[in-house]
Amino acid sequence: ATGQGVRDRGRTPEIPELHVLDHLFKALVDGHDPRSLAAPEVVERLRDQYVGGMIMGDPRATRHGGDVVVEFGTDELPLAEYRITTRNGAPFVASMRVLERR
């Protein structure tokens, strides 16, 4: 609120990088082309495994230089690290590394 009215500043997510992962998983489930969201190796690893699960536990994010590493698993995928960088001005999942096998 200001002397000139109220301004909506929207909501700021705690881990904004989760949005690109959410979009990536949705593209995979819906059969859309996810190449603008993630590296081919990430897409191939996820394509056969992910059919729509819920994130388990609390995702964690750490900054490494200009990248963000998000760590989480789903009820279908093992715990993994997803390195998110910026490509063409947008978040991009550059790599994925499994931390825990099921």
Image (cartoon, grey):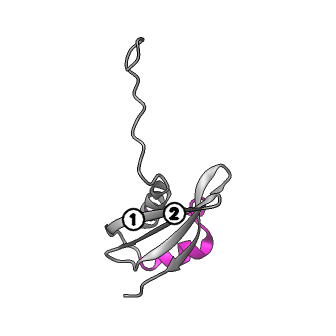
Q: Secondary structure at mark 2?
A: strand
Residue 48 percent coordinates (x, y): 45, 79
Badge 1 is on which residue? 59
66 sits to left or right of 43: right
Above or below 45: residue 6: above
Is residue 39 covered in magenta?
Answer: yes
Q: Which residues are magenta?
A: 30-49
Q: Which label sits in the foreground, 1 or 2?
A: 2
Q: Which residue is mark 2?
A: 62
Under circle 1, the secondary element is: strand
In-image side of 26 versus 45 (left or right): left
Work out which residue is located at the far bottom of the displayed protein and give it. 102
- In the rendered image, residue 19 lying in the magenta stretch gets the answer no
Q: Position of residue 98 (x, y in %)?
A: 49, 81
Q: Residue 47: give x, y in percent of width and height.
A: 48, 75
Examine the rendering and report whether any part of residue 33 can be seen.
no
At label 2, counting other C-alpha atoms closer than 10 Å, the crowd grade (few under 14, some 14-19, many 20 or more) is few
